[in-house]
Amino acid sequence: MKGTHPAQSSRRRSERSTAWDMRDAFSIDVDRILHSQAYTSYIDKTQVFYLVGHQGISHRVIHVQLLSRIARTIGRRLGLNDDLIEAVAIGHDIGHPPFGHDGERYLDELCREAGIGPFLHNVQAMQSLQRIEKGGRGLNLSLQVLDGILCHNGEDMEPSVTVGPGASFGELDHKIELTRQGKSPLPMTPEGCLVRIVDTVSYIGRDIEDAISLKIVTRGQIPKEASAVLGDTNGKIVYALVEDIIGSSRGGRIGYSKKVYAALERLKQFNYENIYLNPRVKTESTKIRTMYRLVFQKLLEDVLQGREDSVIRASFLDRLDESYRRDFTPGEVVRDFISCLTDSAFLRLFNELFVPDFLA
């Protein structure tokens, strides 16, 4: 399998020559993402479990680091580009709002009601990386990195992925629209395909370990038809899946063998039934949904009324250039602001807006 050469990279805006730079194009993109405000926010964003107050439970930052490490291990064996893999992996969840996939669902409801279309974290990543970072100028990442981030698809498993179209930024913009319509366009590089496949590998066993730590499930509950093939610990599961992907990927196809994919499907079914949809995990979800609605409506009212003293003005709009304020509607501005918040920043904002202070 042939990796993507840095010379194939392209950027939406031309830049001065970096011939003096020891880094290639994709290595530069890794550094730009690592030093971005959005990447810093990963440390306080939910992976699966929120408001648990338990030391050692994964946050979003752990997930993206695990994905990067696992994907690069496989990529080296397949002859792919390490830096491109890393850039896509660490950037793939940039668009996640506070409180994980629950928060994504609540923000999606509000965005649709506001008439600005669905909220999708991979599409929001495009907005963050291209229009919010660097004061509204964006990071000017390469097409191949942005395409891989947009086209990751960890929530919906697939037995294999092959390279799709994507020769220009026009094609990327088309893929963004297809994604808004509920479609799942293929990545333009084998590195993007690998990250898309390995997203599941990086969380499936780790989520089980977190759930065991929280006494939501026990190791003995893991279905035998999955554990007999993959093992019953995160380490064993990751190793089995990595080994299978390396052995099963060839030509333009990256994926699993039939036997391992069947076991992985059963394991993911177990996770959904016993972890992700477990009522014990969702005890505070109704409150979070209400908080989302109140915050969204209050901030939207502030933007529509042009309130200069609003927190969205001081903490967000004032640091962005005039083109951002010109190009996006009030609903889109509120969406972008909320999606950038960490879990604790969202809670502080809610308290500031709706919980009265003592006068003395």
Image (cartoon, rainbow, N blue to C red):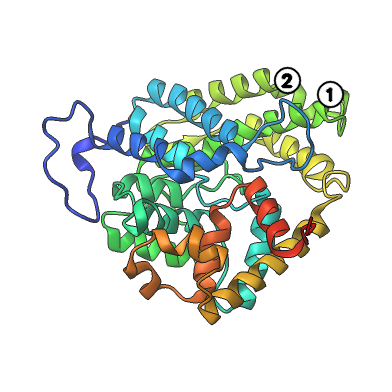
Q: Residue at x 54, y 80 (%)?
A: 304
- Can residue 182 be seen? no
The label shown at residue 238 is none
Q: Estimate the x, y position of residue 7 in percent, counting from the top left.
A: 18, 38
Q: Are marks 2 and 1 in contact (CB under 8 Å)?
A: yes
**For numbered disc 1, what is the local secondary structure?**
helix
Residue 56 falls in image quadrant = top right
Which residue ends up furthest to the bottom in the rendered image? 305
Rendered view: 67 above or below 113: above
- For the residues labelled 2 and 1, the Cα–Cα distance comes to 8 Å
Q: Give the left or right position of residue 91, taking residue 218 as reference.
A: left
Q: Is residue 67 visible?
A: yes
Under mark 1, the amino acid is Arg
Q: Is residue 81 left or right of residue 348?
A: left
Residue 233 is tagged as 2
Which residue is drawn at the image coordinates 17% and 52% (left, top)? Answer: 14
Toward the viewer: 157 or 24? 24
Where's the C terminus, which quadrant?
A: bottom right
Q: Amino acid at mark 2?
A: Thr
Q: Give whichever of 326, 177 is nearer the camera.
A: 326
**Image quarter hosting the N terminus:** top left
Q: Residue at x 64, y 34 (%)?
A: 203
Q: Residue at x 53, y 53 (%)?
A: 340
> In the structure shown, which secondary structural element does the residue marked by tag 2 occupy?
loop
Position of 143 relative to 316 (above/below): above
From the viewer's perspective, tell me whether residue 187 is left or right of residue 8. Answer: right
Residue assigned mark 1: 219
The quarter of the picture where residue 276 lies is top right
